Amino acid sequence: MINLVGILTADLILAQVKDRPDFGEEHMVDNMTIRAGALANTILPLAKLGVKQRVFSMLGRDAFGEDVYREIKDVIEDKIVRTETPSVLSVSVVQEGGARYFVTYSGNAYAFKHGFIESDPSFADAKATLLYGYFLVPDFGPEGAKACLSMAKASGQLTFFDANSAIDGWSDKSREEILSFLPLIDYFMPNDEELLHLTGCAGVEEAVAVLFAHGASSVIVKRGKAGASAFTRDDVVHQSGYPVQAYDTTGAGDSFNAGFMYSILNGCEMASALAFANALAATVVSRQADRYPEVGEIELAVREERVAVR
């Protein structure tokens, strides 16, 4: 069992946009999807990998919340709080080639607080905890994050952490909060852009050194098409990405998280974990439908160094 703690959203995705419109302009697009997003982008691939999950999150009782709940309810142990405040809705605009930006309606994000986690005795039963999307739940705050991670560590769990991008433009406050969590995190999993913003450094290696100085154990850096790198105090491991034509990059990093956690919890060495996670993420971004592969398909992609597109 793994605990997943973080925000659930409904995602409206407009994919294969040719040009980013300016204010006052209107562009047409032929590809639109509405699906469960944020933490669901990790829940669904983990479910396909056969991982048991206990999900601590929040959804509104609105139509979007009901749709998200229906999509995930059969594959999780449900610790989801339902609110009268509507669910979070994120609009993702994805350009041809994979670049994207997001505009998010906050909905019930500010209702997400840590009390419902601390009061649940089942939290301690898991092998690991992922704390996801810290900046998307502003009132969870550093106290909530530290309480969650400390509870996991106290019960002997591995801790994984993915903050996402700071919604305040990486203020000093946001940087200080993330750095203060590092001694409680076994695997910190930023992308390269987030890492550089967090530290103010110009290069990844320099940035990782800053994180180690603040108590980091392992830093897993997601580098998009370039693959991923793992930094520990004793070693550095790089794994290249898989060349694919990206259809929709929304949730790529979240799917990587799923593949990486699955591998680590199954005792894989770092190089194998990165390769598996890269293959899973590449498969997800390249597919228009049936995005999430099974274990055998990912293992075949790793062996043959290619991803099957559908």
Image: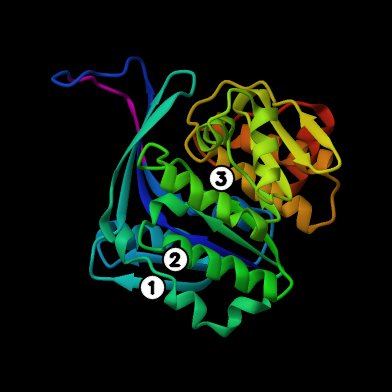
Residues at marks 3 and 2, CA–CA distance in whole angstroms: 16 Å
Residue 174 rendering spot, x and y as whole percentages: 44, 47
- Which quadrant of the view contains residue 180? bottom right
The N terminus, quarter of image: bottom right
Asked if the residue under mark 2 is in contact with the one under mark 3, i.e. CB atoms within 8 Å, the reply is no
Residue 250 rendering spot, x and y as whole percentages: 47, 36
Mark 1: few/some/many CA within 10 Å (<14, 14-19, 20+): some
Q: Please name whichever residue, 269 or 218, is drawn nearer the observer in this view of the structure.
A: 218
Mark 2: few/some/many CA within 10 Å (<14, 14-19, 20+): many
Query: Dot 3 corresponds to which residue?
Result: 254
Residue 28 is inside the magenta segment: yes
Looking at the image, which residue is at 77% across and 36% down? Answer: 275
Q: Is residue 138 above or below residue 281?
A: below
In what element is the residue under mark 2? strand
Q: Which residues are magenta?
A: 26-33
Mark 3 / mark 1, whichever is N-terminal? 1
